[in-house]
Amino acid sequence: MDGVIVVKIGGATLGSHDTTLEDMVHLQQQGRQLVVVHGGANKVTEWLTKQGTPTQFVHGERVTDKVALDMVTAVLGGLVNKEIVATINSMGGQAVGICGVDGALIQGRIREKEMGYVGAVVKVNLALLEVLLKAGYIPVVAPLSLHSFDRPSQAPPLLNVNGDTVAGEIAAAIGAERLIFLTDVAGICDQSGKLLACLSPEEAEALMASGVASGGMVVKIRACLRALSNVSTARIIDGRQPHALLREMEGHGEGTTIGFVYQG
């Protein structure tokens, strides 16, 4: 699977005026191989609120009890995933929607009891992704995991996994050409708010340790650092900009690069 691009799209960057899915179709038609991982936390919260169920986040991640897990599965694995796939296919692309449970793609264990049914990824099984990519499809992956390790007898068979984490793990397992996070910010900024174009892994670690990088950005940075075990370039860019993904692939993108060698 040489030359695969792993793209993480957050629910906050997808809207009626978004060009990301259009860009994906264009890239696919150019012969590029894409694996897409999506989030959708806002949509899950919206549906939980309709049910009168409160939501709690810790460091940008949802505390997931059984009710929340059911909603995450239904909304991310169903509604959000299928809307993305339907849009890509209606634009002339070829996409298939799956989640980390399908083909035992993502296999994990409970990360910490306080977070409920939130998973830590233990293993990535690439068999299904290989089949889909070889057949010419864009796999669109919802971030759920099989509860494969240390599962208590009464525990559900699925786990909720952060989408950024899933993207980093898949990119590392594939040995992707690059990992791209499309976010709702310009990239990683320093304490004064200035965009940092390039960061070494050590500099990225320092930003997290100092608290300059916080919340959801910490999860993205950790995913980038995980991917760098087998990926040369990880990028965090502003997905709100028109054709941000296309510009990124053409070498005109702005944002933050995390890598062992600075990319100009």
Image (cartoon, rainbow, N blue to C red):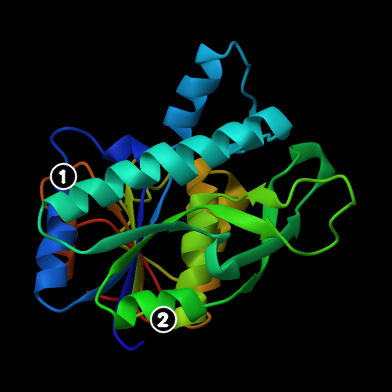
Q: Which residue is mark 1?
A: 241
Q: Report crowding for label 1: few under 14, some 14 to 19, many 20 or more residues within 10 A (C-alpha).
A: many
User: Residue 11, relative to residue 37: is it above or below?
Assistant: above
Q: Is residue 257 left or right of residue 48?
A: left
**Residue 193: where, in percent of width, then height?**
34, 40
Q: Report crowding for label 2: few under 14, some 14 to 19, many 20 or more residues within 10 A (C-alpha).
A: some
Q: Secondary structure at mark 1?
A: loop
Q: Which residue is mark 2?
A: 130
Q: Secondary structure at mark 2?
A: helix
Q: Give the CA distance from mark 1 to mark 2.
A: 31 Å
**Residue 234: where, in percent of width, then height?**
38, 69
Q: Which of the 4 quarters of the picture holds residue 68?
A: top right
**Residue 201: where, in percent of width, then height?**
50, 70
Residue 204 visible from this viewpoint = no
Q: Amino acid at mark 1?
A: Gln
Where the N terminus falls, by quadrant?
bottom left
Taking depth in this image into account, of 24 and 129 the one nearest to the observer is 129
Residue depicted at 48% across the width and 47% down the height = 217
Q: Amino acid at mark 2?
A: Glu
